[in-house]
Amino acid sequence: MEKCAVEKDGLVAEVFPFTGYFSDINPLFTGSYKTDMEVARSCWRHINHIFEQLEEFRAFELLRNGRDRTEYLLVKEAKIIAMTCTHAALRRNELVQLGFRYDNILMEEAAQILEVETFIPLLLQTANAGFAFNYQLIDVPDFNGQGESQPSPYYYQNLGEAEYAVALFTYMRIIGYPADKISIITTYNGQVSTVDKYQGQQNDYIILSLVRTNNIGHIRDVRRLVVALSRARLGFYVLCRANLFRNCFELTPAFNIVRAALQLCQRPPRLLIIPSEPYPTQRKSGEQSSGEVITIENTVHMSTFVHDFYVSNMESMRVNYEKAMEEYRRQVQQLTLPPTPDEPVMSEAERKAEEKKAKAEKAPEQEKDIMFESMDFERLEEVPKY
């Protein structure tokens, strides 16, 4: 393409290196610079498509036995996978080691499963970057000597949990989590978005504030608790006064199961974070991180840490933002390029190339492309010590 920077009729035909491959298309080039450039781009797309297919099929050349090929198809190509909760729990380690990932999960007869089983999908994944655990029950003590407050009748607030939730959201954004993947929900309008309004919705990462510290309130209805516990896909962090909700008679079965799971996993009531680990991470769920683990004691500790963390990484975030904006502008520029009037010529070249390939191979209909996810990694520069 660099050799064809100067618009000159006949130049494309002189420098195009794959003319021999398309020798059955006669004539391939017409002599017009614009028309020949479109034909050259069309031919290049066809050649590039061939190499993409070879890259996809290479896995089957390397994987010789049926089990390895089955696992490859499961992890890389399968669109729908069905299994029971029991099977998912039994094969959890194997699925994680294979790098199994999913976009959505649908549970049949969800009303019949236990609350703790809704956490199984959170375990079939890589670890959440910057966190020691994928889900955690966080006991939030009084903030400035106050727990819940009631500015007006039936209007409850908890400033400590609200500040904690905002600081947690900010921390996740600093280490690279996308904002649209995080939701903050609560049980009262005085905080953010309520559990009732969020019914039927979900997100990758959920921060749940239960607000109350003196009485349970309407969350005593176990159906609301089930809705709250089932909104997260990849990460779930509950801010509450742990002893109050664990001692509620109506919620005892659900909280006992969750508490048992937390105790089995040795998860403390304080948030554990790994600020040196940027999003996303390749660390497996349940695998220990090599970075320093910091225990957050209370709301003041979390807010102070996030402020210092933000200041120490401001320059790196600015650089990453400028790179992201430059990439965004480049993509927008490519999408907004005006269409060329020579599209029929380009399509004809592609059609003839496909006919040649079909005659040579006499192969059945080809499979669709396998789409592989690409990820950009961010790096943090400094981490404050506590």
Image (cartoon, grey):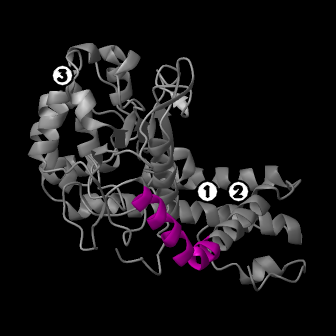
* Label 2–label 3 contact, CB within 8 A: no
Q: Quadrant of the C terminus?
A: bottom left
Check residue 328 for magenta coloring: no
Residue 113 in the figure: left or right of residue 310: left
Q: Quick one: label 3, few (<14), some, or many (20+) residues within 10 Å? A: some
| Residue segment shown in magenta | 300-320
Residue type at mark 2?
Ala
* Label 2–label 1 contact, CB within 8 A: yes
Frontmost of labels 2 and 3 is 3
Q: Position of residue 154 (x, y in %)?
A: 53, 18
Residue 163 in the figure: left or right of residue 236: right
Residue 123 image-quadrant placement: top left
Residue type at mark 3?
Thr
SS for dot 1: helix
Q: CA distance from mark 1 to mark 3?
A: 68 Å
Q: Quick one: label 2, few (<14), some, or many (20+) residues within 10 Å? A: many
Q: Name the residue carrying label 2.
A: 349
Q: Name the residue carrying label 1.
A: 353
Q: Name the residue carrying label 3.
A: 252
Residue type at mark 1?
Ala
Q: Position of residue 88 (x, y in %)?
A: 17, 36
Q: Residue at x 19, y 17 (%)?
A: 249
Q: Earlier in the sequence, mark 1 or mark 3?
A: 3
From the viewer's perspective, is residue 98 above or below residue 26? above
From the viewer's perspective, is residue 189 above or below residue 93? above
Q: CA distance from mark 2 to mark 3?
A: 69 Å
Q: Residue at x 64, y 69 (%)?
A: 321
Viewer-nearest residue: 17 or 218: 218
